[in-house]
Amino acid sequence: MMLRATIIGYIRKPDPESIYIEIDDKYWPGALQVDQFSHIIVLWWIHERNNAENRSNLRSYPPREGAALSGVFASRSPARPTPIGLTVVKIVLLDEENRRIYIDQIDAIDGSPVVDIKPYMPFSEKVDDARVPSWFRNNVPRYTAKPLSDT
Amino acid sequence: MMLRATIIGYIRKPDPESIYIEIDDKYWPGALQVDQFSHIIVLWWIHERNNAENRSNLRSYPPREGAALSGVFASRSPARPTPIGLTVVKIVLLDEENRRIYIDQIDAIDGSPVVDIKPYMPFSEKVDDARVPSWFRNNVPRYTAKPLSDT
């Protein structure tokens, strides 16, 4: 089975104040109502890791103090069998005229291909008491004011 | 640019009590430490929608009362340009001997290819006050006890 992702747009970061997804003309009708959601999940291709060597990586040390050797499925390493990035972002503005979705942040470089956008649904994506290993417990939360559980 | 996803395993649902991801032998080393996390994000291919007609869908009505016509990027329709499914699930058990990750639920049919697994990180994936349109506000939350905000 051949699983081919479709590029529906690109991440653009012309300057640090301006971060947006530029949706291809053909796929812009798919953005109807997206601004009814405050947050979206952006699936993008980590294209600078789209090579055989990076895609054969299965284990590495997360860049955190005290981190244990971890499988790629227990880490967010960009070097992984399917080099797909997943980032929850906040919508800042929808620019209909230029087919842009302005967002608050994304850990993708300028020019990264976007393959899907899904609306963030608290009923399925919000987990109140998720457990993470000790080496990830000091990460500063982006969209929650409460301190993360330390259990 | 050709964006090809790698199949790292398959969803198996032999009976309603037993739902697991069977990781391919080759990719099992990537599961090291995954059970340090309580929840994971499963990225899977909606293979029964992997055809030109379904992939050209850009707008549809979400199956909810009062839902407005919505672009695919404002809905979780399985018919979309890149037919990739995203599900946050709870890990039930890691079966090392058979290379299986037992999970509590997934909205994928038996035999669906899995292309990536990422650990659920509250610091980046938990959003306290996400806004959704009115037609999604009655969805019953899976992993949060508190009622969803209605604002």
Image: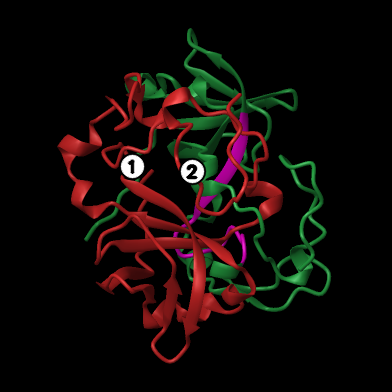
Chain colours: A green, B red
Choose top left, top right, bottom left or bottom right for residue B7: bottom left
Q: Read off the residue under disc 2.
A: A43
- Between A122 and A97, the residue placed more toward the observer is A122
Residue drawn at x 82%, y 59% is A138
Mark 2 falls within which chain?
A: A
Question: Relative to A21, is A4 on the left or the right?
Answer: left
Q: Position of residue B121 (x, y in %)?
A: 65, 56
Q: Is mark 2 on a helix, strand or loop?
A: strand
Q: Position of residue B59 (x, y in %)?
A: 29, 24
Image side of residue A7 versus residue B137, left or right: left
Let me know if residue A45 appears in the view: no
* Image height of A28 relative to A149, above or below: above
Q: Residue A82 colored magenta?
A: yes
Q: In which quarter of the image is residue B34?
A: bottom right
Chain letter of the residue beneath label 1 in the structure image: B
Check whether the beta carbons of the residues at disc 1 and disc 2 lie within 8 A of each other.
Answer: yes
Q: Nearer the viewer, residue A67 or A46?
A: A67
Q: What stretch is highlighted in magenta?
A: A75-90
Q: Is mark 1 on a helix, strand or loop?
A: loop
What's the amino acid at mark 1?
Thr
Q: Distance between the residues labelled 1 and 2?
A: 10 Å
